[in-house]
Every structure is written in C-alpha cells, then in structure tokens.
Image (spheres, rainbow, N blue to C red):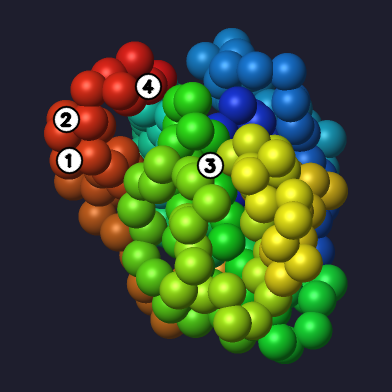
Amino acid sequence: MILLIETSTPVCSVALAKGAEILAIRENHEGLSHAKLAANFVDEIMKETGVKLSDLDAVAISKGPGSYTGLRIGVSIAKGLCYALNKPLIAVSSLQAIAQTAAKHYDENHLFIPMIDARRMEVYSAVYDAKNECLRDVQADIIDENSYANFAKQPFVLLGDGAKKCEEIFKNHSQIHIDETLKFSAKNMISLAQKAFENKDFVDVAYFEPFYLKDFIAGKPSVKGLK
C-alpha cells in the first residue's frame, strides 16, 4: 500500500495504490495550487478509502525536475508522513514515470522524450527507450529544429507539458509525434514505486532533496524566474 504524491508540475496529484491497483486519486490541473490542495488530497483519499495512514507501507514522491515550489511542498508532506509514521520514502523520476506509461501505447521501435515546461522555449527532458531504459540523462534543453537530432533515426514521442511548445518547430518531421493525451500524474508512478519498494530502494527521509537542476538555473540567466 503506497501513497503517491506528484507535485513537480502545475498538476497536483495524489493517489493511493495497493499493488498495481489505484484505490483513490485526486488531481488538479488548474495551476500551482499545491500548497492549498496537496495535504487536503491526502486527507480526502484516506477518508474515502477508509485506509489509515498507519496502514501505509511507504510514501512515494516525484523527485523532479520541475517546479521548485511544487517539489518543496510535495517533499515536505511526504517527509512529514514518513517521519511521523516511521515509513520508508521512495523517490520517483517524474520524467521516467510518464515515459514508462507512454511506452504501453506505442510499439517497441519508438523512443520517448518526456518534457517538463521550464520557460520560453526551454524544457527539462530525458530520453528513454521502449523498455524504460534511460538513453540520455535529464538535462535542460533550449528547443530548436536540431534538438534531439541524435535520436532521429527512429520515431520518437514528445510527452508532458513541455511538448506542446514543440509543435511548430517539429511540424515537418514525420518521425516525431507529439502526444498531449498523457499528463503528469501520481498514477504514472505506481510501477516504479512498487519496484523500488520490492528492491528496498528507499531514500533517506532526513537528507533527501528534490532534483532541481540548480546548476542549469544558476548558469543560464534566461531561467532565473523559473518557479
């Protein structure tokens, strides 16, 4: 039984999963209202299911990259629960989670490039194959027509809230598909969180910090306003 919290993007999403089954989920897609909603979502889900917080086996949090404020809120809630309940904390990559979900809907020849909108034509992205193996680590990209040219030998799918800004740039590339149907969500985290739990792949509740890509932000004045 794992509580899943996704706050790395404007989507605020909390779910409770037992094995591969979602028992309850709450989501808001209307913007960065995480401070007001995330803790309430946890409370609502536990009341709806009748599950006690003490019955949880672990809490899983999206570790980023993404919104600085959103990540801090989600991690603070997850840490508070784990500390009070003496439960393990699991950290899941938001990008890897949505890439794994997308792979179920495409054939094995596709690559998957999940994107989190940063600012202007900038995104946080990584590249995964159909087996959810990372082919290029997370980094901040300024999108232009040459972006991801190293992967253009096979079809690839752009996902997440940063993909829409790529429509005009890649409109003439037949190998590139933009999928706007999949959103960042706590439900995408289930498989990775369950695997981490089985492998006892936990993070330190006291010292865990989200992945902010701080070096990029400090080195690129164009994203100083990123929240």
Residue at the disc numbered 1: 215
Residue flagged by tag 1: what amino acid is it?
Asp
Q: Is residue 13 left or right of residue 104?
A: left
- At 36% from the left and 65% from the top, the residue drawn is 137
Marks 3/4 in contact by CB < 8 Å: the verdict is: no
Q: Between disc 4 and disc 2, whose residue precedes?
A: 2
Location of mark 4 (residue): 226
Looking at the picture, tell me which residue is in the foreground, 25 or 221: 221
Q: Position of residue 7 (x, y in %)?
A: 54, 34
Regarding residue 128, the answer to whether it shows in the image is: yes
How far separated are the C-alphas under marks 4 and 2? Answer: 11 Å
Q: Residue at x 79, y 46 (%)?
A: 180
Q: Quick one: which residue is furthest to the front in this view?
A: 172
Residue type (three-letter) at the residue carrying disc 2 = Ala
Q: Sequence-wise, which precedes: disc 3 or disc 2?
A: 3
Q: Which residue is mark 3?
A: 116
- The residue that disc 2 covers is 218
Dot 3: element: strand
Question: x, y percentage for residue 150?
Answer: 45, 74
What is the spatial separation of the Cα atoms under label 1 and label 4, in whole angstroms?
Answer: 13 Å
Marks 3/4: CA distance?
Answer: 12 Å
Contact flag, marks 3 and 1 (Cβ < 8 Å): no
Toward which corner of the image does residue 25 lie, by quadrant? top right
Marks 2 and 1, Cα distance to the nearest angstrom? 5 Å
- Give the image quarter of residue 226: top left
Label 3 or label 4, whichever comes before in sequence order: 3
Report which quarter residue 227 is drawn in. Answer: top left
Please tell me which of labels 3 and 1 falls first in the chain: 3
Q: Is residue 60 above or below residue 143?
A: below
